[in-house]
Amino acid sequence: MSEKAERMKRRRGAAPLGNSFVIAAHTLWAHKLRSALTIFGIVIGIAAVVLIGATLGIIRDIAARSTAQTIGADAYTISRVAASGRLNRRELADKLRRNPELYRREAEALIRRTREDARAAPGLAAVADVKAGNRTFLSATVNGSTPEIQSIRNIVLSSGRFFTEAESRRSAPVIIIGQDLVDELFPTRDPIGRSLRIRGRALEVIGVQQSLGTSFGSPLDRVAYMPLGTFEKIWGSRRSVTVYLQPLPPVPLEESLERSRVALRLLRRLRPGEPDDFDILVPEADRDFLLRVIGIVGVAVVPISSLALLVAGIVVMNMMLVSVTERTREIGVRKAVGASNRDIFAEILFESAILTAVGGAAGLALSFVGALGLGRAFGESVPLSGAYAALALGVSTLIGCGAGFYPAWIASRMPPVEALRYEN
């Protein structure tokens, strides 16, 4: 066969396919309401998969940031009991019974032994009401520490300053407050230089922490920082402290952590083989725990949401079967005037493919709108995951083509004589 003949054959083959596509599009347009309802199912399925993927992604990012904000970037903590929220009642009771209190004097001895390896700061925390004039802020988290805590926990101020080493040594009555306290206690005034009271003690506001927003619905701006000595004047000194440590370059985190662990074991005269009677917590441990929980949720939720795509495929198949049944006589007429089985098959399959393609595009558009809403809810941009979008489109395309294949096969194999006899 000559090259010209081959080209003519390909053109003749392409023309019927083009005609089938046009006929399929006209058929769907003629039944706009039915087509729209079918597309709606695909839209919901794709949007569900993509938005769930985007939500899981942003939750992972928030988990990483919140653990770093709680402990500090590349930092770790040593305390009597760490991560108590992840322990059951028996485990917590065992640790409280086995681990002695870590008082300030012992913490300062540990800091002296590790000062060449890590930047360290002892810390205490309590929940208290804060008053300014006739206004009261309920249940603020008040922290007492040394100036090093600012760099360890990366505390950024929007105004004012942090307390100095001199103020820390003389237990100056100064305080840094979070944005929630500013909004409640000083809604129309600059808080810097103003006075507030905690448990009857007057404190001068010298700084405001930059707003951190929320983490998993928990506000991060209900905090205040004061010198450790000032904290002890208000609540007393017989309290177990937490020591925050951050490796000094170029000491690796693992090496600094091990040196601190050995130093505290030596201070407590623990013999080789004896278990530690204190807890060490690193951000990775807390973050990995959260990410494992999120991963388990993702493994369960994504397949469940994908069922919406399967249901949408069943709806598409049902519509195609109804369409084939309604057009049985039309199919018979077209076959009688020369339409081939391939033409009929392509037409029905095109209808299914068009529904899936339009539904996929609309689903991604809805996902984009939903991502904007999620961004406002989380207070940050929510990027759509390309992997989840590809998964949703791939699954919907396979389901759409699969749903249209059987009705198309039935229509293409329909005997023309029987089709012409059919009456609705």
Image (tube, helix red, strand yellow):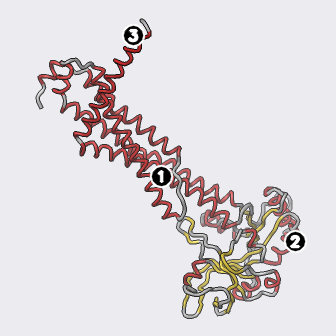
Q: From what the image shows, is residue 304 above or below residue 55?
A: above
Q: Is 352 or 61 nearer to us in this picture? A: 352
Q: Is residue 337 left or right of residue 134?
A: left
Q: Considering the numbered disc 1 on the image, is that residue within a helix, a strand or a loop?
A: helix
Q: Quadrant of the C terminus?
A: top left
Disc 2 marks a residue whose amino acid type is Arg
Q: Nearer the viewer, residue 35 or 26?
A: 26
Tell me the kind of residue under disc 3: Ala
Asked whether the residues under the numbered discs 1 and 3 touch, taking CB atoms below 8 Å apart as contact, a structural biologist would say no
- Say which mark, if any, is on residue 19: none
| Residue receiving disc 1 | 52
Q: Disc 2 to disc 1, how far (Cα)?
A: 49 Å
Task: Give the label on residue 112, or none.
Answer: 2
Name the residue at the front extreme. 4
Name the residue that disc number 3 marks: 5
Secondary structure at badge 2 equals helix
Asked which secondary structure carries label 3, the reply is: helix
Q: Residue at x 78, y 87 (%)?
A: 171
N-term mark: 3 or 2: 3
Tag count: 3
Q: Quadrant of residue 247?
A: bottom right
Q: Residue furthest top?
A: 1
Kind of residue at badge 1:
Ile
Figure quadrant of residue 257: bottom right
Which quadrant holds the N terminus?
top left
The correct choice, above or below, for 42 with respect to 54 in the image is: above
